[in-house]
Amino acid sequence: MREEKDMRVVNFGSLNIDYVYRVDHFVQPGETMSAQSLQIQCGGKGLNQSVALARAGVETWHAGLIGPEGHFLKETLDRAGVHTRFVEESAGSTGHAIIQVDSTGQNSILLHDGANGRLTPDFVTAVLDQFSAGDTVLLQNETSCVEEIIHQAARRGMRTAMNAAPANEKLVGLPLEALSWLLVNEVEGAFLAGTEAPEAILDTLAARYPETTVVLTLGEQGAAAARGGWRAWGPARKTAVVDTTAAGDTFTGYFIAAIVEGKTMQEALRLAACASSITVSREGAAVSIPERTLVDERVRQLDKGN
């Protein structure tokens, strides 16, 4: 199954300042614990996914809002090769995240929307007026106006991908049936499908959204895709895990990049999994996302069995 080739991607994406605390274990209710270290980094699923798209070689525009203290986020996007004419300053604070990373590399994240929650329908219209039918819109569940963006993109004949993260009540009632691609992990898939078994998640969501390609990431078990009765599976790439913070965002960016390039679904799953495996072997969020040349070389090595 091959998706049609597209040209431009606009990401209505969250922009966060990440406060990353290294801890022995996640803090428990009632517990006071000293962190081993603190790093302040660029983050937000939107920012990470735009960086991944750009590093994968896609012409990417980011649309979003920051507060006065968030201009280094825009500068990070600029350095990654992302177009930032639609990143604007808003009154109030920038979105931010409190991230705990434990001794096994797993993470626990607390989000504050900040400027990400201040997108307006007028802002959405002004951005989408600069794009056309056939272009691709990317979304996450970390900004306001998600429903408005989906409806406007559909009316304009644009294709829309959504990484339905985080899984919360905001997802309920969204017109997910209008999406071209719906990307979820096991937690998000179970939330939407009401079942935890991977094949049951795929079956439920594929039946509910028959015109949408559902992509389910499964960590060490790889990833799967479904549309109607069609299925594709992609293996995970084994690696030593250091930090999983941007793993899903890397997968999303490289998956969309592969689809934009006209690769098959199996090729897209393989490329995205390989890129994600490099990300988890490094510390940090956006800084851990690999360049395309490294990912392509890793894919070639894997194809040769090295």
Image (spheres, rainbow, N blue to C red):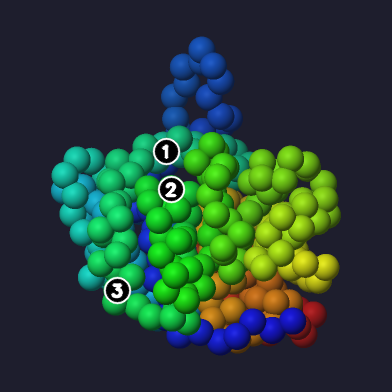
> Are the residues at dot 2 and dot 1 in contact (C-beta closer than 8 Å)?
yes
Residue at image mark 2 = 142
Mark 1 or 3 closer to N-term?
Answer: 1
Of badges 1 and 3, the one in the foreground is 3
Residue at 58% in and 56% down: 176
> What is the spatial separation of the Cα atoms under label 1 and label 3, in whole angstroms?
30 Å
Q: Which mark is residue 111?
A: 1
> Which amino acid does the dot numbered 3 rest on?
Asp
Q: Quadrant of residue 127?
A: bottom left
Residue 25 appears at what percent x and percent y?
58, 30
Residue 64 is at least partly visible in this image = yes
Q: Secondary structure at mark 2?
A: loop
The structure residue drawn at horizontal position 56% and vertical position 20%, both measured from the top left corner, is: 28
Q: Is residue 153 left or right of residue 249?
A: left
Specify few, some or many for label 1: CA neighbours under 10 Å numbering under 14, 14-19, or 20 or more: some
| Front in this rendered view, residue 225 or 23 | 225
Q: Secondary structure at mark 1?
A: strand
Residue identifier under label 3:
129
Return the residue found at the far top. Answer: 30
Going by the image, does 45 lie left or right of 258? left
In this picture, residue 240 sits left or right of residue 163: right
Mark 2 or mark 1, which has the lower sequence index?
1
